Image (spheres, grey):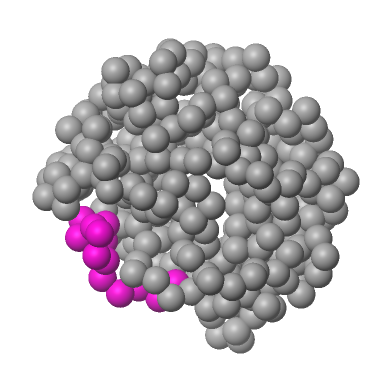
């Protein structure tokens, strides 16, 4: 991120913290629920929610830029299934927003020309082949490795994202080995209900003991200098108490938010709100932001949100000390 963008982001955070402003500095934009996979902890592919057209999405991006957004994480479903995905990415850049993308990797090689436009690509990886394929479907591991190969050869900045389940808590070394091979970082995320998808996760969740043992091993590796672990040391210690977390003020809806495929605005999609949330298309993002409820939940362990919460509370030890393992930038 350019120095000017960093300074503008800092000003936005200060306004949010001390003046109570709602500034969507970081936004996850759900562009589709369509997906090539049917993962055990997700049911978005079965959603009947509508999907915004190109014009609406481009208008949203421009409005977000005017409100101070600096980073958009394009997500789904599988966002590369949209025919207009290149236009969406280009619109982000044209409006001074850095576009990231969450992908299962299944169509990355075929869409590598589009993927090269992204600032950072996050590939979902759940462990060795037999585990990944069990969670996500036969052949999905081979496809995500092909995606990593394509990204690596084309000098795309990318990393892996791993959701911890009872199937993979003892297989994290495999993910870290692949991270080292490709010079990519790996984020380890706790399992939690997503209220736009699967609600019953008890059959795939690890026991608290299994989870804490896995995180404890990551903490040891992090302390020993493993630079491929995306999570900060403070962040790992925070999630080690999963499923119950230490108190940490949440800034969801004030400094970051989620826009669903139909334009519904969420502070966070891991909470059941029992109310109708505002829509960005009918109200405009500024008005929709002002109507968002304050978040109250049992705590969060997801890297991006956790780090923004640490930063907003001036707890800089909660930010990851990520070095640029591959020293190239496209822009």
Residue shown at 54%/21% (left/top)? 106
Is 240 magenta? The answer is: yes
Image location of residue 63, percent across then percent down: 81, 60
In-front residue for pair 232/108: 108
- On screen, residue 56 versus residue 25, left or right, reads right
Res 197 seen here = yes
Outermost residue toward the right? Answer: 55
In this rendering, is residue 307 above or below 156? below
Q: Quadrant of residue 69?
A: bottom right
Tell me the quadrant of the picture where the C terminus can be found. Answer: top right
Image location of residue 218, percent across then percent down: 20, 43
Image location of residue 261, percent across then percent down: 69, 48
Residue shown at 55%/42% (left/top)? 44
Residue shown at 81%/69% (left/top)? 283
Q: How many badges with numbers are in the image?
A: 0
Res 158 seen here = no
Residue shown at 66%/63% (left/top)? 265
Assign the magenta stretch its main secondary structure. loop
In this rendering, is residue 117 above or below 19? above
Q: Quadrant of residue 183?
A: top left
Over which residues does the magenta segment extend?
A: 237-250
Is 300 magenta? The answer is: no
- On screen, residue 286 versus residue 173, left or right, reads right
- On screen, residue 4 versus residue 245, left or right, reads right
In-front residue for pair 226/50: 50
Image location of residue 232, percent across then percent down: 32, 52
């Amino acid at each position: 991120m350019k120095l000017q963008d960093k300074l503008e982001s800092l000003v936005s955070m200060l306004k949010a913290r001390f003046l109570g402003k709602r500034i969507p500095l970081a936004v996850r934009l759900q562009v589709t629920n369509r997906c090539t996979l049917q993962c055990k902890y997700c049911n978005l592919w079965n959603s009947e929610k509508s999907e915004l057209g190109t014009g609406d999405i481009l208008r949203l991006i421009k409005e977000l830029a005017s409100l101070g957004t600096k980073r958009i994480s394009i997500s789904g479903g599988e966002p590369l299934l949209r025919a207009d995905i290149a236009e969406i990415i280009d619109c982000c850049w044209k409006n001074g927003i850095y576009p990231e993308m969450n992908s299962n990797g299944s169509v990355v090689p075929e869409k590598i020309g589009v993927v090269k436009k992204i600032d950072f690509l996050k590939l979902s990886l759940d462990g060795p082949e037999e585990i990944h394929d069990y969670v996500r479907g036969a052949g999905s591991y081979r496809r995500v490795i092909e995606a990593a190969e394509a990204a690596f050869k084309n000098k795309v900045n990318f990393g892996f994202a791993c959701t911890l389940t009872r199937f993979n808590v003892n297989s994290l070394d495999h993910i870290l080995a692949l991270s080292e091979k490709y010079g990519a970082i790996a984020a380890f995320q706790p399992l939690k209900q997503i209220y736009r998808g699967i609600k019953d996760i008890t059959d795939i969740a690890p026991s608290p003991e299994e989870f804490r043992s896995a995180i404890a091993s990551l903490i040891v590796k992090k302390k020993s200098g493993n630079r491929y672990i995306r999570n900060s040391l403070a962040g790992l210690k925070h999630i080690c108490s999963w499923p119950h977390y230490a108190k940490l003020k949440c800034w969801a809806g004030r400094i970051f938010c989620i826009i669903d495929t139909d334009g519904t605005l969420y502070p966070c999609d891991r909470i059941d709100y029992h109310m109708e949330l505002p829509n960005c298309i009918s109200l405009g993002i500024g008005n929709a932001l002002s109507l968002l409820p304050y978040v109250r939940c049992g705590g969060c362990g997801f890297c991006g949100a956790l780090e923004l919460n640490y930063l907003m509370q001036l707890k800089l030890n909660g930010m990851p000390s990520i070095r640029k393992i591959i020293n190239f930038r496209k822009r």
